[in-house]
């Protein structure tokens, strides 16, 4: 009878811990960024930095948020998952005291939610990426090529911008 009591108490002590899981830590739950690479318009195989590049995301018709401010041949920008498009204003200043040239890019896409895990929840992937460059009298962006219309990771370029 004593052995049965001991087994009963051991069983009662084990049952509460049987349903426990390890701590949920999300390591793979990031929505991918759109990767834009900048190329020389005269030699389409050469990367080309953009002088004094400032990228702003258009949040509402009269609100811009600065996303990045750098001179680089590539940038990673977030797309909005709550809308079917995201608009960016990319500005370039070729010299420190020269004029600033603004170009407006709008990316349209379909958002696809993907369940990762209980800890991470859902992330957004993007499909059927398309772009529209607002044409003005002085575009510094000459052309745009979509390399990969599906955005599932931030490892490679999705868009080539020639300037």
Image: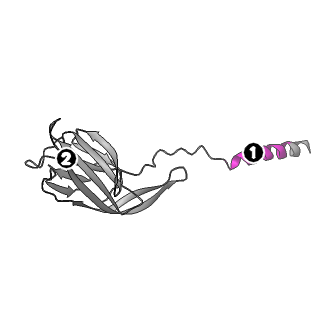
Colour basis? one colour
User: Horizontally, is 110 left or right of 163 in the view?
Assistant: right
Q: Secondary structure at mark 2?
A: strand
Give the number of the disc on residue 28. none
**Outermost residue, right direction?**
1
Q: Which residues are magenta?
A: 6-20
- Say whether disc 2 or disc 1 marks the residue closer to the N-terminus: 1
The foreground one among 143 and 136 is 136
**Outermost residue, top direction?**
96
- Give coordinates of residue 83: x percent, y percent: 39, 62
User: Badge 1 local density, few (<14 within 10 Å), some, or many (20+)?
Assistant: few
User: Badge 2 local density, few (<14 within 10 Å), some, or many (20+)?
Assistant: many
Which residue, given by chain and number where applicable, does mark 2 sit on? Answer: 38
Helix, strand or loop: magenta stretch: helix
The verdict on residue 156 being magenta is no
Taking the spot 21% from the left edge, 50% from the top edge, the residue there is 102
Q: Disc count in the image?
A: 2
Which is in the foreground here, disc 2 or disc 1? 2
The foreground one among 113 and 57 is 57
Taking the spot 45% from the left edge, 59% from the top edge, the residue there is 114
Which residue, given by chain and number where applicable, does mark 1 sit on? Answer: 14
- Report the Cα–Cα distance between label 2 and label 1: 60 Å
- The quadrant of the image that shows the N terminus is top right
Taking the spot 29% from the left edge, 53% from the top edge, the residue there is 88
**Residue 51 figure quarter:** top left
The verdict on residue 8 being magenta is yes
The foreground one among 142 and 146 is 142
Q: Secondary structure at mark 1?
A: helix
Q: Is residue 15 above or below residue 114?
A: above
């Amino acid at each position: 009878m004593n052995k049965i009591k001991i087994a009963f108490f051991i069983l009662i002590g084990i049952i509460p811990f049987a349903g426990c899981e390890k701590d949920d830590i999300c390591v793979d739950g990031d929505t991918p960024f759109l990767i834009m690479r900048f190329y020389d318009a005269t030699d389409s195989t050469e990367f080309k930095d953009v002088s004094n590049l400032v990228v702003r995301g258009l949040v509402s018709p009269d609100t811009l948020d600065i996303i990045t401010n750098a001179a680089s041949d590539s940038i990673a920008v977030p797309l909005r998952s709550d809308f079917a498009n995201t608009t960016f204003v990319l500005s370039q200043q070729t010299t420190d005291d020269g004029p600033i040239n603004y170009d407006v890019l709008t990316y349209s896409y379909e958002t696809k939610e993907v369940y990762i895990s209980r800890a991470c929840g859902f992330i957004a992937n993007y499909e059927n990426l398309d772009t529209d460059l607002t044409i003005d009298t002085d575009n510094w962006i000459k052309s745009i090529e979509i390399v990969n219309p599906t955005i599932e990771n931030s490892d490679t370029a999705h868009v080539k911008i020639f300037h």
